[in-house]
Amino acid sequence: KKLMNAEFLGKLSDYDKDSLDEKMNRRWCLMIDPQKQGNRWVKKLWKERGIRIVKPHDSTLMRTMENGVRVGVPVLLENAGETFDPALTPILNKNITRNGQRLTIRIGDQDVDYSEDFSLQITTTLPNPHYTAEISIATTIINFTVTPAGLDEQLLAETVRIIRPELEAQRDSLIVQAAKDADDTNQVEDDILNLLSSVSGSILDNEDVIQALDKSKEIAEEIKKRAEETKQTTDLINAARNQYRDVSRRGSLIYFVIADMANADP
């Protein structure tokens, strides 16, 4: 999952990559996705959790949503238009009611148990959709439209993966390690903050705090050293990958030339 996220996000340039997970958790994502890249990514990301896929005009739309909400499985609403079935409004707005430990949401004329594991992602292939203020407020709109630079990077990765698979495998490994190091750093910081918040009296007299700080320093130094080594290796890998840059640039150019031909006056 780390590789899938890091590898995919590394190809995007239209929004703040570091905040994607936060956006997806805070509000449901509505992805402008003409090339269906976001669609494919979501399907891969949630495949192991048994993602349910549905389209706006499917007769099973609300039943699929209700089952997803109740059981706690992700749902992908693909090929969305500019308007949504009003029955989806409570789900889009997360109109969740808490009664003790029980969470419910009103769907149609009944209260349905709501699982916090439920996730809804929406994709549209419309290149320039216009959404109402209500939809814009209820969702986080992310533009997955391919850019020349983004496509250049994707084609370069695919080219190197075919010609020099060991090079791209090494790059993937570095991406995973960098993601793990970032997680470890955040975990150490959280552990220290939790420990400090629970300490009474002088911190300097608390042996657990001293040991935790020493341990965190060791981990931080290891990660810093690894980051420096990773940068050197990455520079060498990128230098080797850039030998194939002309191939990816020409591929990107051809794609956008063909795409723009659709706008030509016959």
Image: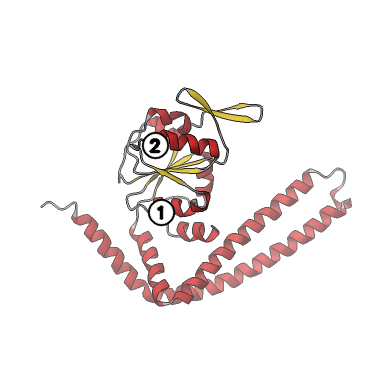
Q: Nearer the viewer, mark 1 or mark 2?
A: 2
At label 2, counting other C-alpha atoms closer than 10 Å, the crowd grade (few under 14, some 14-19, many 20 or more) is: few
Q: Which residue is at the far right?
A: 205
> In the structure shown, which secondary structural element does the residue marked by tag 1 occupy?
helix
> In the structure shown, which secondary structural element does the residue marked by tag 2 occupy?
loop
Left or right: 38 as drawn, with respect to 205: left
The structure residue drawn at horizontal position 87% and vertical position 47%, both measured from the top left corner, is 202
The structure residue drawn at horizontal position 34% and vertical position 33%, both measured from the top left corner, is 83
Q: Which residue is at the far top?
A: 109
Image disc number at residue 5: none
Residue 225, percent across and down?
Answer: 65, 69
Badge 2 amino acid? Thr
Residue 114, percent across and down?
Answer: 55, 33
The structure residue drawn at horizontal position 66% and vertical position 58%, both measured from the top left corner, is 184
Residue 14, percent across and down?
Answer: 40, 52
**Which numbered disc, 1 or 2, marks the residue that appears first in the sequence?**
1
Q: Work out whether 250 lies above or below 199.
A: below
Q: Which residue is mark 1?
A: 40
Q: Which residue is mark 2?
A: 60
Residue 177, percent across and down?
Answer: 59, 65
State the separation of the CA atoms marked 1 and 2.
Answer: 22 Å
The structure residue drawn at horizontal position 34% and vertical position 69%, both measured from the top left corner, is 248
Q: Work out whether 13 lies above or below 228.
A: above
Badge 1 amino acid? Arg
